[in-house]
Image (tube, rainbow, N blue to C red):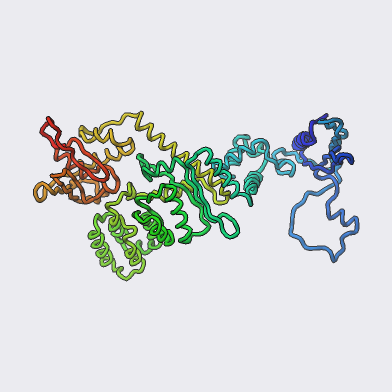
Amino acid sequence: MTFSTPQDARVYYNRYARHAGFSIRIDTSRESKKDNDKRKVIFVCQKAGVNKKQKLDDEGLITEKKIVRQRRRDYVDRTHCPARMIVRKTAPSQWEVVHFEQEHNHECVKTFSLTKYMKSHREIPAEEEFIKFLHGCCITTTRAYQIMVELYGGIENCPYTEDDAKNLRVEYRAEYQEKDMKATLDHFEELKKEDPDFIYSYTLDEFDRVENLFWVDGAVRKSYELYGIDRNGITIQLGCGFMRNEKIEAFVWLFTEFKKAMGGRDPINIITDQDLAMVAAIAQVFTTSVHRNCRWHIMENARKRLGAFLDGKPGLADDFNDCVDNSFSIVEFEFKWQAMLGKHEINDDERFKHLYEMRNCWVPTYFMNNFFPFLQTTARSEGFNAVLKRYVNPMNSILNFVHQYKKIQYRIFGKQTMHEANTTVKVLHYLTGHPVERQMKQMYTRKLFNVFQDELQLSSSYYIVRVEGDSLLDVVPYGCCPHHLYAGRTFRVSENSVDGLYSCDCCKFQRDGVLFCHILKVFDALAVREVLIWGLRIQLLPKGKGARNRRE
């Protein structure tokens, strides 16, 4: 037989060896003295030759004093096996088999599925790139290997092991070792060519190593001018930063770069965890922003620290949740908090003292008039952290993180497109004959219109009681009203008849920006047919000339 290269010869002989039940290695190769070109290659059975210790003993090179204790390690016992194949270069791009010895002096492995554990057969064939692709999709090595086993029709047919797949990941992680940051910055330069509005910046330490890194693309910079969640209620990414430490100066640098990228405009509202360095940096850089700590995060930490204590005091957990979630004014919160402390005799509990001292940073009632949409029962930031964890492996390179971050961006764009298509293509059904419902269908996206319809349905659980003439109206729940919604309580709506402005003490419109059940019940009682909304204010449209006798 002839082959184009010695590598082709090795592949062929190794394939034959696997079916015959043995492993191979290259014993030696000879080079031409004239041009150092390889002329002959000898492929032998893995058991050819002798064991290293036996060879040294035969040559008398080991004495009793020189023996060193080593850790126990398995090895392949060499038996002077004569099986081999020799190829010689006979012409350019032609290697001819000049000798072939088939017989072995030992037993070969007879079970084909076991041969993949032999050294020369522990190689990942052509699907190496596909496994890298699976890793790039954040599929773990174990699951990637399971996929390949299924494709091969069983683990006995898969020509490599799970450890081999793991080693593959280690290999391409090592590709970026010591050059990861340079590759990342080069990638950013390529992104700038594709997107002129793409911005990145970094700082160097005294050893010229990257200390902090920030980047944001053009599409996000345009989105920032409009929202932090889009009109379908989807969280969007507003940039990303890496910091070597979490000191105040590092956060100041990051927030300053973010602010410069966004045209010097502060975010209206910010939600973070309780990191003190971040709090100080926000106060220094985002001077006009409303900053609050994540309520969900604080409540989860409180439950972890107080879990057993709450269980030991019946009713305390319910009172605590009611105090935090169902206080619609600071006065009400203060009253409920003191009542809770007295009822359960916990006035001196340091944990509750700490929560109370920081109340204006996280309790919802302190932010009733600030726009924090749909944050009452969910933690938007925690949900987004979960998305990051699904896409990002902390063991991977920074360049890999950048690629994964971009995939999250594409995922968000895909969700936005899907919701826009639903709004454009699908026909929404009306639940009532209310004219405001038809108006809101033209104003809201499909997702927000569904939220509005839920509120519209809930309005039927209330009735109106007039207080002090026409300026104040109490929206009172019927006895069968779902008590988990708005705590089954009465809310007061204020009317400014001169300007046609309406507001409710639940402040839901200011917080979420969607018309809600209390104001809708008032509109129904007043026969309102059309509403003007701007900013976070609700106004009835004035009567038009020639209009019917109605309130608009």
Q: How many marks?
A: 0
Q: Is residue 125 above or below residue 263?
A: above
325 displayed left or right of 303: left
Q: Residue furthest bottom?
A: 348
Look at the image and tell me in which quarter the C terminus lies: top left
Residue 397, how many percent across, how many down? 58, 49
Q: Quadrant of the N terminus?
A: top right
**Which of 506 and 541 lies nearest the eye of the viewer?**
541
Give the quadrant of residue 432. top left
Give the farthest residue toward the right.
Answer: 59
- On the image, the x and y values in percent for residue 501 come to 18, 45
User: On the rendered structure, is 245 left or right of 152?
Assistant: left
Residue closest to the eye, 349 or 473: 473
Q: Quadrant of residue 116?
A: top right
Q: Position of residue 150 (x, y in %)?
A: 59, 36
Q: Residue furthest left?
A: 469
Q: Is residue 389 visible?
A: no
Residue at horizontal 77%, vertical 63%?
Answer: 69
Image location (x, y in percent) of residue 184:
57, 47
Whether residue 236 is visible here, answered yes or no, is yes
Q: Dividing the picture into quarters, in which one does residue 227 lie?
A: top left
Residue at image position (41%, 34%) is 417
Q: Residue at x 87, y 60 (%)?
A: 62
Q: Where is 56 relative to 309, above or below?
A: above
